[in-house]
Amino acid sequence: MRSHKYNEGFSLIELMIVVAVIGIVSAVAIPNLVSSKRSANEASALAGVRVILSAEATYQATTGAGSYGDLAALASNSLVDQSIAAATIAGPGTAKSGYLFAAENISGSGGPAFDAFTQPKAHTSASLLFATGSRSFFVNESGVMYFNMTDTAPTCSATSDRTVTAGTGGGVLN
């Protein structure tokens, strides 16, 4: 009887072709995945700012006796989630979906006022691959959402006119 000798496996060329195809697919897919994650982070940040806006209205009507509260006051009254309260810009907080938050009562503006904003922990201007967001967001007692394309949120004057400066590439959402 004769035995047949079979060569099993892949040749070096076949393996190199498979590795090249995987590399090409990865080069196309990874930037899209990173961009999708940033978009999801921004959507989560917007939802967080909307929660803060609602919490400020509730705080003013109840516990605040006509005044707005800061992020700590909102959290201590269970008006915002602890993940938002822990993701503070001022402190060593852990980012919520890649964003940091702040809310503060503004005095001297002629009436009750607050500023709430969120900004990415790692902005796209620092690193495209590791960035958690490309826009920063702001809202005040008017309820109008503002954004800009920088790593810091839009600002608002503490005067009675409450003028918002949206900054580079900024605008209004709603």
Image: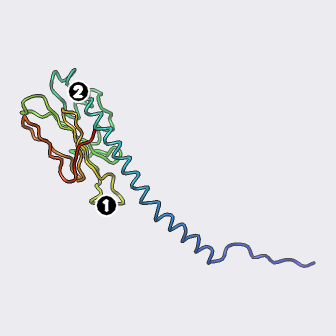
Distance between mark 1 and mark 2 Cα atoms: 36 Å
Tell me: residue 66, above or below residue 47. Answer: above
| Residue 108 picture location, percent across and down | 6, 33
Between residues 119 and 46, which one lies in front from this camera angle?
46
Between residues 128 and 100, which one lies in front from this camera angle?
128
SS assignment at label 2? helix
Image point (36%, 51%), residue name: 38
Q: Residues within 10 Å of mark 1 (few under 14, many from 20)?
A: few
Quarter that holds the N terminus: bottom right
Query: Disc 1 marks which amino acid?
Result: Ser
Tell me: residue 54, above or below residue 89. Answer: above
Q: Quadrant of residue 125?
A: bottom left
Query: Disc 2 marks which amino acid?
Result: Ala
Image point (54%, 71%), residue name: 20
Tell me the residue that label 2 is attached to.
57
Image point (35%, 43%), residue name: 43
| Residue 16 picture location, percent across and down | 58, 75
Tell me the residue that label 1 is attached to.
127
Q: Earlier in the sequence, mark 1 or mark 2?
A: 2
SS assignment at label 1? loop
